[in-house]
Image (cartoon, coloured by chain):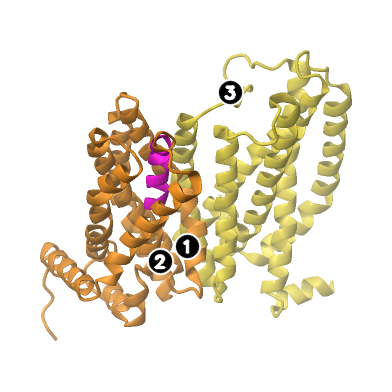
Chain colours: A orange, B yellow
Amino acid sequence: MTEARDIDILHYCRSQTARHLMLMVRSPSEVVNPLLFFLLVILLFPLGLGPDPEQLSVLAPGILWVVALLSNLMICMRLFVDDLEDGSLEQLAMARVPLSVAVLPQLLASWLASGLLLSLVSPIFGLMLGLPLDVAPVLVASLLMGTAIMLLLGAVGAALTVGVQRGGILLALLILPLYVPILIAGTRALNEALQGGDPTVALALLGAGVTGGLLLAPLAIAAGVRVSLEL
Amino acid sequence: MWRIIHQFGSPPWVYRFCDKVIPWLMPITIGALLVGSVWGLLFAPTDYKQGDSYRIIYIHVPAAVVALAGYYVMALAGLVSLVWRVKLADTAMRAAAPIGAAYTAIALITGAIWGKPTWGAWWVWDARITSMLILFFLYVGVIALFEAYENKTVAARACAILSLVGTVNIPIIYKSVDWWYSLHQPASIKFTGSSAIDASMLYPLLGMIITFYALFALLMMLNLKQSLTEEYAQSAWLNKRLAA
């Protein structure tokens, strides 16, 4: 029996994040598919609404945000599934690192591969929908924070539904109502920027959401994982 | 004091309690519903602007008020079940969810009916209506999550977590939707200061709100009793009670 010693949590988080990022590099389709989905759905809107750039640019904030929300939902559906199947989720729950901390590296890795990537390429999609380039910083900033909150909230739902048969649709039902404030704040920031107003209020609210989410969501995620593992 | 709290965690005691309370709560609630409806629908004065169409307020507002309170009842039961692992709290949470969903649906439907003559449309994307719709989905989510699990003890814990997450979010959703767009009139009843509604209309409304609370309690007890009968079908205390 080894002697009990403190675990270096930072070291743990670094190595776990690296592990999850490595897993994503090994199966790039998990990273690329949500982005392709984003592009495809955005393509559907001009086809459905007509190619008029004026009209599209009015609708663009809503379109971009709703599609970002949906692609985030796709990522959340996969979040704990593999780890539950191969048993590493159970190991995680047994580890001496508190579970609420232990789930964070995976979320960070997922966000780097989805939210961050999506936010950085979003100005291109914005241009396709006729958004002027000078609102790009607001678009990127709002999506950076918005995708982080959505991932944190979605992870709570994912943790609760990972053990359930056909949990995907259920996850959407549980989580989409909770996304409402994020959608409102995000589109508000963009619309303010488009109309020459001040987007900082909406952006600050999103920032507050990230902070609050980082504080509270890990507790709920950990509780949800324990429920799913029936511990 | 502690004894009472402990008693509320005991299924046989709660079963007996429900049995004792229901026989007098049921007639009072039904009576109050009748009196309140007749008072509100026939005797309260007609509104000078909206005419008689405003009378749906006597159903709409109480349902909406109690629908929101019902969520907190559910979340509180969830908290008790998570923290103290009181099994009865699970049952209470499960009993509250469908009733709350039904109240929310009533508030939405009566709102649509009221909206047609006053705003000229069945549905408008107004802040409060939208947040009621979201509340409805939160209720449905809890029910759906409960149904999805095979193991009902686990299901109850999952629902408890979900309803607590929802509780943190409800004020945020309300504020954000309010910020988004508002057409609905602001709340007319204030407990401090004077209300924007006349006493002759206010009293039947307050009466109906209390009645709807009583109805919620009654339905919840009936629901609880039924769940307990299912859960403890093999228990000696229940069989003895049913035989008596």
Q: Residue A10's image quarter?
A: bottom left
Place of residue B38 in the rendered image (x, y in percent of width and height, measured from the top left): 88, 31
**Secondary structure category for the residue under label 2:** helix
Residue pictured at 27% horizontal, 53% vertical: A118
Amino acid of disc 2: Met
**Residue B203 inside the magenta-drawn segment:** no
Place of residue B202 in the rendered image (x, y in percent of width and height, measured from the top left): 73, 22
Q: Chain of mark 3?
A: B
The residue that label 3 is drawn on is: B186
Is A185 displayed left or right of B70 in the figure? left
The residue that label 1 is drawn on is: A171
Q: Chain of mark 1?
A: A
**Residues under labels 2 and 1: Cα distance?**
7 Å
Disc 2, disc 1: CB below 8 Å?
A: yes
Is A208 displayed left or right of B121 in the figure? left
**Residues under labels 2 and 3: Cα distance?**
39 Å
Q: Which residues are magenta?
A: A56-69
